[in-house]
Image (cartoon, grey):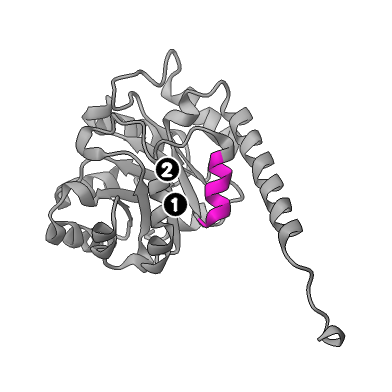
Amino acid sequence: MSGLFTDALLGSPLPVIMEVKRRDGNGVELLGERTIPEIVGEYTAAGAPCISVVTGRWFGGDEQMLHDVVALTDLPILKKDFITRESQIVAAKAAGASAILLTARILPRSSFQKLIEIILRHELTPFVEVADHDELDSVTHAAECIVAINNKDIRHQERDAGDLDLSRSLLEATIATGTPCPVSASAITDPRVAAELIEAGFRGLLIGAGLLQSASVEAWVEEFEAHRRALGGAAAQAAPPPISPGSR
């Protein structure tokens, strides 16, 4: 099971982890009048390869949300919370999670590394969030982890607007860890910017509020895919023509 979440994300034509989240860091309600089954239905219809569930109380979450989402879909599930001990990992696995969030910024380095090993021992995927080079350097077993750049500051409960330049500046170093799946997470709302991040080299995006506050998840995805096609075409046009052997 340890590679289930990663394989689903890397194998999908839509590299977007879609997130179920009740509130943002400023307390803004994200679900509105919609129910969790309705949100999961929208995500599934839009082609989500996997789903993130925020169970952390800061964001209005609870453990029942994970159970509810697992009961609604066969897609791999990421549990997002402040994980600090093995018992939480065991409970998440029993509930049906395939991946577990670890946030380097709120954990001592030794605890962070120990928890990576514990998650792997339980045959789950460590989804490790980092925000600077030192935190990237602390990631162990990166080849078995998803390494995500959190564009918001968790120390302030992600109340800031976010800085996508953080992802751009850390992309090369994230790839250098050996992770098969560098991810940009949080503060991604514009489908065009999302497409640019994938074109730059990210293998996945984690998007919650950007989708939940859009007029339509399906329309957001369609616009994202249109921008990806346009960027891919532009890249192909910009590339120099191949040199034939006879022209050397």
Q: Which residue occupies the foreground of this view, 64 or 180?
A: 180
Task: Say whether residue 58 is visible.
Answer: yes
Residue 210 on image: x %, y % = 47, 30
Disc 1 packing (10 Å; few <14; some 14–19; many ≥20): some
Residue flagged by tag 2: what amino acid is it? Leu
Disc 2 packing (10 Å; few <14; some 14–19; many ≥20): many
Q: Taking 173 as reference, is 107 above or below it?
A: above
| Residue 55 highlighted magenta (yes or no) | no
Residue flagged by tag 1: what amino acid is it? Arg
Which quadrant of the figure has residue 242?
Answer: bottom right
Answer whether labels 2 and 1 touch (C-beta < 8 Å).
yes
Q: Judging from the image, what secondary structure is the residue with disc 1 in? A: helix
Residue 117 on image: x %, y % = 22, 64
* Prevalent SS, magenta region: helix
Judging by the rendered image, the residue that carries numbered circle 2 is 164
Q: Is residue 120 left or right of residue 219?
A: left
Judging by the rendered image, the residue that carries numbered circle 1 is 168
Residue 80 on image: x %, y % = 30, 41
Measured in 3D between alpha carbons, the distance from the residue under mark 2 to the one under mark 1, in whole angstroms, is 7 Å
Q: Residue furthest front?
A: 248
Q: Residue furthest top?
A: 33
